[in-house]
Image (spheres, rainbow, N blue to C red):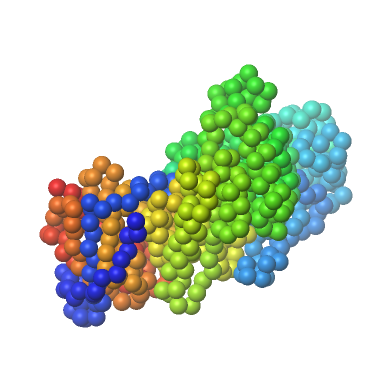
Amino acid sequence: MRFLMAVPLTVVLISGASSPADCAEARQAAATIDASKTGAPISKNIYGQFIEHLGRCIYGGTWAEMIEDRKFYYPVTGEAPAWGMYEPGMPSWEGEGHPYELLERSPWMIVGDNRAVAMVKKGAFVGEHSPEVTLPGENRSAGIMQERLGLDAEREYTGRLVLAGDPSAAPIRVSLVWGGGAGDRDTVVIDTLNEAFAKHQLRFCSSGTTDNGRIEIVGRGAGRFRIGTVSLMPADNVNGWRADTLALLKQLDSPVYRWPGGNFVSGYDWQDGVGDRDRRPPRKNPAWKGIEHNDVGIHEFMDLCREIGAEPYIAVNTGLGGAEAAAQQVEYVNGSDSSAMGRLRAKNGHSRPFGVKLWAVGNEMYGDWQLGHMPLEDYVKKHIQVVEAMRAVDSSIQPVAVGAAGDWSRTMLSHGASHMSLISEHIYWQDKDDLVEHVTQISDGIRRIAEAHRLYRKELPVLQNQDIRVALDEWNYWYGPFEFGELGVRYFMQDALGIAAGLHELFRNSDIYAMANYAQTVNVIGAIKTTKTRAEMETTGLVLALYRRRFGEIPISIEGDLAPLDVSAARAENGSRVTVAVVNPTEKRWAVSLTVKGAELAETTRQWVIAGPSRWAFNSPGRERSVDVRQTSRYGPIGSLDIEPLSVSLFSMDVR
Ligand code: AHR
């Protein structure tokens, strides 16, 4: 059943228009909703999210670690830290040439003579090498330091430092510095050093606010000391996750998170991300620009999901990885503690199986940008082999196959249908000059994918007894300069309108879409943006949070010649209320007369509006919001809906 049908326009007057001029100018439309004509329930997983090890999505956005390259992937040479320019190699990805904070060499600087620091391979604490400082003696200092830390006054920071060295090299002074004055620092003194690496706890309080705070690790004794690793986080971190970002994630309230990629997963070895966090190896991100610190792995992801009440959806590597590693991963996550991998998990602190059901089997394997990309015929076989190995470990998992509407999805479904619970699709859009087109391209794209899958359902014999729905597990706009690290594009009011229209299209095709994961959650094409010390909801995040919280679960029919508005309606699962949402991608006010059939509504309407002063309005972390959600209530028969220019409006009426 489709929920948008054409009927002639009806002219009505509205109450509540803000001024007579507005009223006179308001465009008119009419809609009829019928609560007795319902569609397939909207899966709550339509409000899914996706976090990838890329740019500042996890590290530098969601994970609370403040130290860059804390495990010394890059050698500390004394060369000044360098920040790169993004050159994506894909001309349509407009981040090209826009500078952003991308490390190209060590962010660590040397205190004292550059020759005081050498990178030592033998007995390195983690990774390839550890810095060793040779103290010059005569009470002169040497060590390392890192700048560009974001600090807030009266805020506490905790961490740890792993050190080894000659006893004579002690004491080592570790300082957090927020200014140029002698007193603008808090120092922890480590009095004893030994040949074996040992962990030392750090705790500081900053008395200043700065974007260029500094940590120094310095000795003045005699002999040598080595630095294994160092970590520093705001003391209010929650199991390592940033408290401010976490608060926004809770507002987003997404029921399901896809992790760890994306392109990243096709080169990821999940075993790098388990065990003692300080000993996990730092690596070059296999698909993107930065370093993979491996501080966030399966356990941390599961902690995050538990903290925000979301279901985990884990992607396995079918690019450079294969069936054996995927099966071991399933055993690690879901196996009993008597299995080999389950035992390892228990040793790493979690004896009970995590019980993850949703598994993405690979990512975008159709694309030549994907590590391990291969021809379709080969990949179908690989998919089947990987799923068989995963199911041999846990037959209850729900595998999600890589799809791409067209030949790829058709072939995967024809040959692999019995080896998948869902099939994935991805879609991104750039901006368009015409605002209505900018918005409708989203609904058009989502509808086209649904139509393709409706066709496969008709045509493919194998789908006659199997309901394989679509997981649109990456969807979003993606355009503009990278203001929040790699792929950190900003979103505007115009994008909020498009994302709302996208949700409406997902609702209209609720028989096809079982899941959709907005890509991505933080910084990287993200619904939330962060600076070093602040986090804020993007315009698009406001939309996702509002619909998740307020929109109904059962789509109901809506008729009317409503374009360019996009109107969607639903009732609550328990029938207690009806919600109507309207996207207005025009600079005109609209009056939509609403006729309601199939339900008797109470006379109170609650309304939430997301609107901005222009299509280019946006929010920034640490600044007052220029786009926000306003809530109002109105008494009296519903009659007519007053729709502001450039707005997303959601109306909720109780059913009598
Ligand atoms: O979301 C960013 C990237 O876009 C993902 O890593 C990849 O799957 C897609 O091409």
- In the rendered image of this protein, does residue 126 appear above or below residue 618? above
- In the rendered image of this protein, does residue 625 appear above or below residue 520? below
Which corner quadrant of the image does residue 361 belong to? top right
Residue 184 percent across, percent down from the top left: 60, 50
Q: Is residue 616 visible?
A: no
Q: Is residue 465 visible?
A: yes
Q: Which residue is outermost to the top?
A: 338
Which corner quadrant of the image does residue 132 belong to? top right
Residue 242 percent across, percent down from the top left: 52, 44
- In the rendered image of this protein, does residue 93 appear above or below residue 424? below
Q: Residue at x 37, y 71 (%)?
A: 585
Residue 497 percent across, percent down from the top left: 40, 65
Which corner quadrant of the image does residue 309 belong to? top left
* Residue closest to the eye, 338 or 70: 338
Q: Residue at x 46, y 40 (%)?
A: 310
Residue 81 located left or right of residue 248: right
